[in-house]
Amino acid sequence: MGLLLGSLPVFGLLPDVAVACGKGTIAKWIQRDFGPLQLVSTGAILQRLAQREDSLGEEMRRFLASGGTHSPRIISVELMEDERITDILFNALSDPAESGWIIDGFPRTLRQAQLLDAHEIQPHLVCLLDVPRPVLQSRIMDRWVHVPSGRIYSRSFNPPRHSGLDDLTGEPLDCFDKRYNNYAMHRDALQRHYERKGILFVAAGLDSATIYAQLHTRLLSKTRQPQ
C-alpha cells in the first residue's frame, strides 16, 4: 500500500508498500505542496517515546533492546503486537495542534487496518503506489537489509562476512524477495478493505515524479471538496 492522508485540510495514509517504491520522497513532496502536515512514521514514534522518563519510555526501551536494535532510526514494528502499535499510533495522532497528517508505512496488515477503524481513525485518502516488481528489484539489485539495525549489505560492494547473515549479530538478513513477498501477502486484503470504503487511490508509474503527478491532481480535488 502507500500513503494514508487524514484530518483537515488533507488526510492520508501510505500503508505498507513494496520496498524501494519511493514513498518517502512522495511523502516529502506532499508536505511541501499541501503542508503543514504531520508525517507519522511508526519507527520514529517508537524512537521518540523511548526517550521518555516514564513507564511508557521504559516499555519502548525494552522493546528496542529485544529487537537487537543497534541504530534506533530503523525499527521493525513487525515485532510489536498489532493492538499495541495501533494504540501508540492513535495517541500520536491525538495532538490537536496538528492540522493534518500522513501515515507512512502503516497499516501493514488487514488487522491493523481494522484496528484503525475501531479507533475511528478515518483517512480521507489511502494511496497505493503501484510500481512494477521488476522496476523495484532493479532499484535495489542485490541489497540485503538487517531490519532491526538498518545495516545494509550488497553482494557486489559490501557483502556480509557470512552470506545472508548480519556481521554483528549473526541474524538472518532480509532480501528483496522476502520483503516483497511479505508485502504482497497482505496487499490484496488491504486494497479490498479501502476500496470498499471508497477512499483508495492507485497511482501507477515507473518513477516517483510520474506517480506524484497523479497523486497531486487527486489531492487537489480532495482539498477543494467541502470537509
Image (cartoon, rainbow, N blue to C red):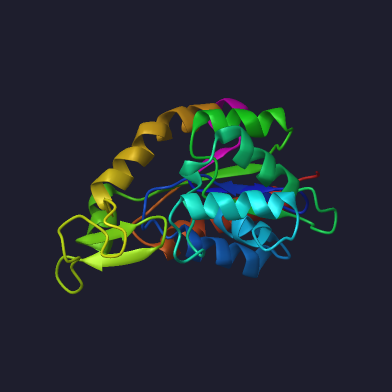
Above or below — where is 131 with respect to 142? above
**Percent of width and height locating residue 218:** 59, 50
Which residue is pictured at 14% across the width and 70% down the height? 156
Task: Name the one closer to the observer, 61 or 98.
Answer: 61
Which residue is pictured at 59% across the width and 55% down the height? 61
**Percent of width and height locating residue 178:** 27, 44
- Observer able to see residue 41: no
Q: Quadrant of residue 140?
A: bottom left
Q: Residue furthest right?
A: 96
Task: Name the one closer to the observer, 67 or 150.
Answer: 67
Residue 124 inside the magenta-drawn segment: no
- Observer able to see residue 2: yes
Which residue is pictured at 63% across the width and 70% down the height? 32
**Percent of width and height locating residue 189:** 45, 27
User: In the image, which residues are magenta?
Assistant: 194-201
- Using residue 191 as the reference point, say whether residue 140 is left or right of it: left
- Using residue 103 as the reference point, say whether residue 56 is left or right of it: right
Above or below — where is 31 with respect to 100? below
**Percent of width and height locating residue 211:** 45, 57
Above or below — where is 28 with respect to 147? below
Q: Count how many numbered circles sit on residues in the image.
A: 0
- Using residue 178 as the reference point, say whether residue 104 is left or right of it: right
Image quadrant in which the C terminus is located: top right
